[in-house]
Image: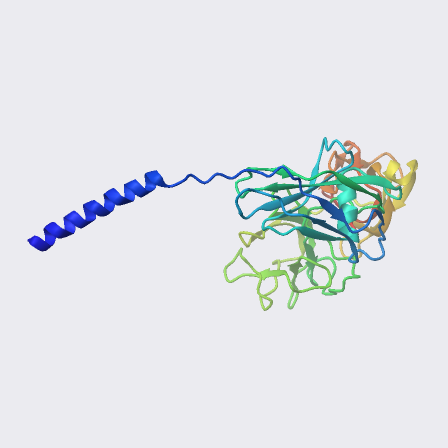
Amino acid sequence: MKNNIFKHLFLAMTLVLGLTSCEDRDIVTIDTVSAPMTMDLSTNSLVLDKNFPANPALTVTWTPAKLTVPVELKYKLEISSTEAFAEPITLITKDKSETFASFTNKEMNEAAKKIGLVAFESQKMYFRVTSLLANDGMSQKSPITSLNITPYLASPTYDYQDLYLIGNGAVGNWDNNATNKTLAPLLKTSNGSQYTFTGLFKSGADVGFKIIKQRGSWDAQFGAGAAAGTLSTDGGSGNLSVPADGYYKLSIDIDALTYTLVPVAAPTKTYTNISIIGTVNGDWNNDTQLTQSTFDPHLWSASAITLGEGEFKFRANNAWDTSWGTNAQYFGTAVEGGANIPLAAEWTYDVYFNDATGNYTLIPIK
């Protein structure tokens, strides 16, 4: 009994002393120091070279931000086309107290594109650094500095993952070389994991197909899963197949690893040629011819063709009797007599068109 009394007294005294010490403890505050950060660029002029995209181009260093208490900071390096920084773009964020960042020719070229600088002209790019606490508080900004930069023509912004059919049961056969441009891409959808393809598929012993992410590589592939209607990413997976030759609509979901193959009616109309026409060719008087697939006569393509900024349509037989269009860049389903297809950037593209469905894809060549 005495032991219990002493224990309770000890705990009570400890609590009182603890409360007293809390009351006497100083509250720590953090303030900025008036001296600003300073920033240094490794050069004051850059002429970017598209032939060496991975070469180092620029290193930015800055002095640490000064606070009255040492704490971990993060830094945000921003760029702008104007000294007023009306529309700044964040070039990089350093989550730790690192005070430097390095960039390649390609990275600086993409940065120049983001702030609207023009290719092949010397222009000012402005820089500043902002320091922040982990909770984005206590921000300090460095003085603004700049350099003259001459970018090259930047690749179009194309943030999509393409998938390709491969196999003797589908267009393209089993030739998995990067140069095999007969491998047809699936049509992308608004859902980044879902794709479709409508076209001719063939059946038979040892006849089938798979889906790959990159021409010339088997590293990412989709074959038959363990259960019907499922996909497998295992390199040893079986081939997908159809029960009989014919036209099918293939729908897949690469996140859920599922697919469906639904028979569709065979197209009843064929064309002798399909072309692109529009201001992407300079004006509406010039056709760029596509090549007809030897596997499926309703599939057309063109490899590495240069198209300008502008708009276009697909048309049949170099005439306006039948043409397809819609207001969607890079991929979509064009309809007969539809709107002009926009193209925001001059570049070299691989082009694919399906005259049975109106499905099309333009892929910028990096």
| Residue 300 picture location, percent across and down | 80, 49
Using the rendered view, name the quadrant where residue 315 is placed. Answer: top right
Outermost residue to the right: 285
The answer to whether residue 166 is above or below residue 288 is below
The answer to whether residue 281 is above or below residue 1 is above
What coloring was used for the rendering? Answer: rainbow
| Residue 80 picture location, percent across and down | 75, 37
The number of numbered badges drawn on the structure is 0
Is residue 316 in view from this perspective?
no
Q: Residue at x 55, y 54 (%)?
A: 257
The answer to whether residue 268 is above or below residue 366 is above
| Residue 199 picture location, percent across and down | 70, 50
Is residue 84 in view from this perspective?
yes
Q: Is residue 230 left or right of residue 344?
A: left
Q: Nearer the viewer, residue 311 or 72?
A: 72
The answer to whether residue 328 is above or below residue 60 is above
| Residue 101 picture location, percent across and down | 69, 52
Q: Nearer the viewer, residue 88 or 225?
A: 88
Q: Is residue 199 left or right of residue 260?
A: right
Q: Residue at x 69, y 62 (%)?
A: 167
